[in-house]
Image: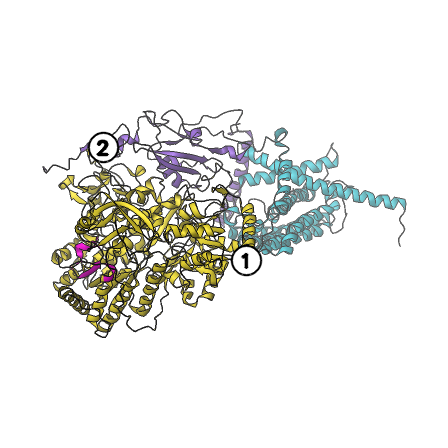
Amino acid sequence: MMEFTQAEALGVLATVAKTLIILVGAVLMAALMIPIERRLLGLWQDRYGPNRVGPFGSLQVVADMVKIFFKEDWIPPFADKAVFVVAPAIIMVTSLLAFAVIPFTPTWTVANLNVGVLFLLAMSSLGVYSVIFAGWASDNKYALIGAMRTAAQMISYEVFMGLSLLGVVLLAGSFNLGDIIESQRGMWNVIPQFPAFVIFFIAGCAEIHRAPFDLPEAEQELTAGYHTEYSGMKFGMFFVGEYLGIVLISCLVTVLFFGGWLGPWLPGFVWFFLKAFTFMCFFVLLRASTVRPRYDQLMAFGWKILLPIAIVNVAITGAIVVATS
Amino acid sequence: MKNAAQTAFSATSSVLRTIGMTFMHSFRKRETVLYPEEKPYLPPRYRGRIVLTRDPDGAERCVACNLCSVSCPVDCISVVKAEDETGRWYPETFRINFSRCIYCGFCEDACPTYAIQLTPDFEMGEFDRQNMVYEKSDLTIAGVGKRPGYNFYRVAGMAVGGKDKGEAENEAKPVNIKTLLP
Amino acid sequence: MAHITIDGREYDVDDTENLLAVALSKGFDLPYFCWHPELHSVGACRQCAVKSYRNDEDEKGMVVMACMTPCSDGGRFEIDDEEAAEMRAQVIEWLMTNHPHDCPVCEEGGECHLQDMTLMTGHTQRRYRGAKRTHTNQDLGPFINHEMNRCIACYRCVRYYRDYADGDDLRALGSHNNVYFGRERDGAFDNEFSGNLVEVCPTGVFTDKTLGAHYNRKWDMQNAPGICTHCSLGCNTSPGSRQGVLKRIQNRFHGEINHYFLCDRGRFGAGFVNRDDRPRQPLVRNADGVLEPRDMDAMRATMEEVLAATTGMIGVGSPRASLEDNYALRNLVGADFFTTGMSAHDQAASLAGKAALEAHAERIATLREVESCDAVLVLGEDVTQTAPRVALSLRQARRNRHLELAAQNKIPKWHARAVRDIGQYNNSPIFSATTQATRLDDIVIEPQRLRPDGIAELGFAIAHALDNTAPAVKQLDDDTQALVDSIAATLKGAKKPLIVAGTSLGDPAIVHAANNAMKALAAANAEARLFVTFAEANSLGLAMMDAPDIEQAFTAIENGTADTLVVMQNCLYERAPKARVDAVVKKAKNVIVMDHSLNRTVGEAATHVLPAGSFAEADGTLVNNEGRAQRFFQVFIPDAPMQEGWRWAADLADVAGRDPEWAGMDDIIDAIVADYPALAGIKDAAPSQSFRKFGMRFPRSPHRYAARTALYANVNVRERRPTVDADSPLSYSMEGYYGEGQPPSTLAFAWSPGWDSNQAAITRFQDEVGGHLKGGDPGTRLITPGTDTAFAPADVTRVDGWQAVPMYHIFGSESQSARAEAIAERMPEPVFRVNAEGAKTLGITPGNDLSLTIDGETHAFPLDVDPSLPDQTIAVPVGMHGVCGVRLPVGVEPK
């Protein structure tokens, strides 16, 4: 049996505490995104959005949460019960696991992995299971069509996401996210890797199926896609999972292209938060302004435009890195 | 190639322009009317609380024909016909379950006597659903509502109190069946 | 067969039909007014205009009236033709010029043929702005309301009333635009079938007054397939209800029985269901002789005591209750202690009737078949008063001669006016022997007025004349012999002769005589038909239950083998003289009555009353006079604790510790079939409870049944859960499968898109217009051929001196309908009738009371002279308005 020293024990405790704070923080942020999104949508659509519950509608999220907790947790009799229950949990778990490798400040990170970027890609790949399971277990044609769309969309856009990251990794010479941030002390990656940033952002949007890439749950055609049959807290988990995705992608953009915690005067965490929050708001702006493409347009755009650009970007970056080293 | 580049440029710029335009809405005035602090004007033909009106003579307009009841898509109107001693039809019961009403106004459209009318009042919230059930006495108002001047029994052919056969608008005197003259 | 083209589609059709009937049969929507499947064509209204083309080359065509156009081979017709459509629209606009703006306050609204046709032709806006013609109305009595303004002068009413029902007091009065349809003066219609005017009139001129008293629209009715319980014919009805109130009876088409028409007793006699004085709670008679209500728990305790203390129960069934109710009673009291509830003489006559039917199982006429018989002999039965609907059929039977003459002159059968004109007074022969003048006498050749023994003798004599191996009666006088010979010859020579007899005179000899005559006739004429009428709706069913008559029940109480009388929907005072019943009731420790009405037994004799459902509140099976088992269904669910008679009997059996465990009708029907193999057919009379069409039940209400979320909102704003019917495949709502594909026995009402009126909508459910229902007419025939082929002996009980014979009346003689308000208003004042000679002999001036003692009971009614009565014969009014419970005919000694 291993013996722990007091210091080691304290270290473990600190890690656990840090982990909890980050996880809870992430979930809270995701939850907060709900009223923020509704207010912002209101702002951009010349209306108010929810403004009655609490000051400026800030407690709307609490009301929504109370409501969703008290809703009947209904499992359709025709559903595959076990899979039906597991599906929403998967998206929550994979999204939260991804947060483990994100360095919010030089010291605030749960796991400082050397293969952080790969871990992220792995986690986002796992997320597709949640959707497929949900669609399959629901035994409902809308849910299944939604799930099939999601699977195709996520698998395709993962390719461009990975390719766009390669440029950043080449520049930093490391898969470690902390190293990537440190490599941007001179210049944020967004400048040398602008095409990669654009592709990553678009692919990120598609990964978490946010507007305009919300085809899997296109309500006009598919009622609610893969989560048609979900209600109560299980639906809530899908819902929070989606907002967790927004927070995650925003954090990643900050880390990979906008120098993470780097910035003058203010503490690192504040810089990180400000940058990430800007992107979260931008996600809402995208939803307020863009239209949903057709499914074939989505695939054509990915494979015929994003893929060549990403490959060219990697090639040029690689050439420059080789030339300068 | 040139065309493709043009398309790519125009597509990208149109998306960016859209995003920009949407963002600029941050600085526009909001359209929302902050009810109940601010009460909007509702036109007379607004579809709110349902009333039963009276004809110009002050008698009930409703003749209990049941057309509102049958046209109601949520089946929330119940009418029971009765007849007074002069043969005039009137509703013995006229009940609207407003907790089911969707204020579609079909009943008003269906009403052949202009008795049932929708009004611009919609503030009918109740804590007890039972209070949403309105009986005839709750529905009947004293006036003619939006349709002054119309009196169904003055047009219909049936004889009722105060109007015998042949005394309605556009009616000839009753035929004398005992005469052989053409 | 003719090959014709309608709107480009080709059909092989019956060439004896007219185009309108064929087009409707093929499912086309073609508007019409004056045509009716039973009244045929006169071409008066000009509404059914279509385009007819001479041949394939003809492109112009000409507009013709479909109802007056024969379907000749090669015909090419266009309904969907611009010119024809324009003509139809124009015609309806003319018809509508004077039609008042009345629809909202018109009882026809929602089932109005005129509304349907106006919409069908597309005339939706009135252009006429001139003054409208008006008419004053007449008071037409308690049945029918008159609103003459609405008339469009289609003449359907007079054609039905005068030409079809042979009525005389409805006429077209006045001329041209002033034509008026009414009576000479105010008053109720004379004819017993006037109620059909309500359905025949395509608009709201004649409406049902009994419905008007508690009106709701057709779409708001909760209906059920019903069977009329007011006589033995088993006419199909469609009772409509709302909120637990029976609103009206409508005709329900049955291709073999009543088809389009009912009698007034059947249509207006159901009012007894809505009476306030009906028992609605379990009642127990207290020491003061007053019935006190009990709640269900208390009643159960009381019944436990009663049944524990009893030394024996004896059951009194009822020929007006369903087989299920009677069987449940039999199950309660035990097979040996069950009686039919029929009086001895009625049971004897009914059994004779049953034997006659069995002897001629394949020659039993259906009511519809009666219309196609071209020579008729009526023995003893005043059908207009005892089984009214058959009188209307007999009136059609006499027109077979008209059709024959028309056929000889190549006039199509549907050409109503021409057939009438060529027929004139050349009727098919109808012979009738009754105790006194009847309402059919106008179409009878030399009506015979004989005492019951004389009628039986006449029957036996005709049998003998047809077949001299049949027993003869003693020497007849020459006139009678000549008559007998001519009747026999006519019957023998006819294409399809018919013999009608019945049990109403309470003399089995008459039925035996008819049976003999039929046996003799059948040998000579294979097409011969027999029609037997019985006393009540289920008399034949009870006769088939093979149980003793009510006398056994009385004897059991009198000699002490039983001390508890259990009565199922029967009135003892209608079955035996009052003194006898009083004595039995006094001797009996308990009289437990399950009934739906406050009759004399409930009011005076019962010690315990259990409120049973009437026909509208129960399901059941009745066997009509042709042995057809027909199911009637619950129209609405009565307020608890009222329930079906058989459920009460099953509850009592449970109290006695022998719970039969019947969950629903299916279980009790299975039990009946197990006990009575002869009744096995009742299982097929209607689909079982579990029957579904595409997984759906069959609706009791039209799909636009309104106000579901407001009807009971004053009681509780939360809607009631729809009740699930454990007894039938019908639903208590508009939900379910409704349409041509459903079994006709479950068709609660008639409606089809564009056709709201009862008589027109049913077309969509018929194999051809006026034919039979798609899927077969409901009911199963139970009569199996008997082995008895021998002639009955010509035994006649002769009464010397004065004899009292029963005198029935359509309104009053049947006790349930007599409790209906409208019928009660039409009940005649009771009188004794004798001929002028008799009045002189008795020394009583007509108008003064005659006091007559029958079966120990003395009655005094004014004396009336009826010259048609035989000598020394007193006609006694039978029923609620007169004398009931005594045995008739019987010898009497008037003083």
Please name the amino acid that badge 2 sits on.
Answer: Lys
Task: Give the chain letter at badge 1.
Answer: C
Question: x, y (%) of residue C739?
Answer: 37, 55
**Is residue A72 shown left or right of residue C258?**
right
Q: Quadrant of residue C308?
A: bottom right
Q: Quadrant of residue A52?
A: top right
Q: Colour of chain A?
A: cyan
Q: Residue at x 37, y 47 (%)?
A: C240
Residue C82 visible, this angle: no
On screen, residue B148 above or below A106: above
Could you tell me which secondary element the residue under label 2 belongs to?
Answer: loop
Using the image, determine if residue C716 lies above or below residue C261: above
The answer to which of C266 and C74 lies nearer the viewer is C266
Q: Is residue C623 left or right of residue C67?
A: right
| Total residue callouts | 2
Determine if residue A169 is in view: yes
Q: Nearer the viewer, mark 1 or mark 2?
A: 1
Q: In the rendered structure, does residue C299 fall within the stretch colored magenta?
A: no
Q: Are marks 1 and 2 in contact (CB under 8 Å)?
A: no
| Residue tagged 1 | C659
Which quadrant would the N terminus of chain A be assigned to in this image?
bottom right
Outermost residue to the bottom: C469
| SS at badge 1 | loop
Q: State which quadrant residue C539 falls in.
A: bottom left
* Chain painted in purple in the figure: B
Q: Which mark is residue B165?
A: 2
| Chain to which the residue tagged by mark 2 belongs | B
In the image, the segment drawn in magenta is: C426-453
* Cα distance between the residues tagged 1 and 2: 64 Å
Q: Colour of chain C?
A: yellow
Q: Position of residue B180 (x, y in %)?
A: 10, 38
